[in-house]
Amino acid sequence: MTRSAGSRAAGSGSHATRTKIVLAARDAFRATGFDRASTRAIAAAAGVNVSLISRYFGSKAGLYEAAVLVPLEHFLDDYVQRWGDYERGPHSATRVAAEYLG
């Protein structure tokens, strides 16, 4: 079976596939935790073959790192930078929220 040019464009390659897997994994890890999340269920939710998890992430632990730990690290780095630059002094809760959230 050959793939048409239109179906290939709709999937837009490995980046789109990787993103679908990461999003499905976040949902699974959030719902059931690392130990109970199944790579087969994650692959099914992403609409991909389970072998792609090994191809893109190496293992379930690698997928967890990409789906949960890397975004958390980016959030914390941003948080520390924003608050490290924040001038000292008393500030109202409204001002703090507005400046942090943008």
Image: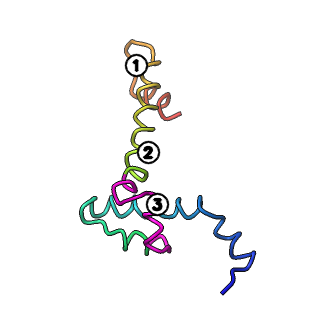
Q: Earlier in the sequence, mark 3 or mark 2?
A: 3
Tell me if residue 79 comes above or below residue 30 in the rendering: above
Along the viewing direction, whichever of 30 and 63 lies nearer the viewer: 63
Identify the element where label 1 is drawn.
loop
Query: Which residue is identified by label 3?
Result: 23
**Residue at screen point 47% across, 74% down:** 49
Which percent across, then down, holds residue 42? 40, 69
Which percent across, then down, holds residue 94? 43, 29
Q: Amino acid at mark 1?
A: His
Query: Which residue is identified by label 2?
Result: 71
- Few, some or many residues within 10 Å of mark 3 (<14, 14–19, 20+): some
Identify the element where label 2 is drawn.
helix
Q: Which residues are magenta?
A: 45-64
Q: Is residue 88 left or right of residue 6?
A: left
- Marking on residue 91: 1
**Residue at screen point 37% across, 59% down:** 59
Which of label 1 and label 3 is nearer to you? 3
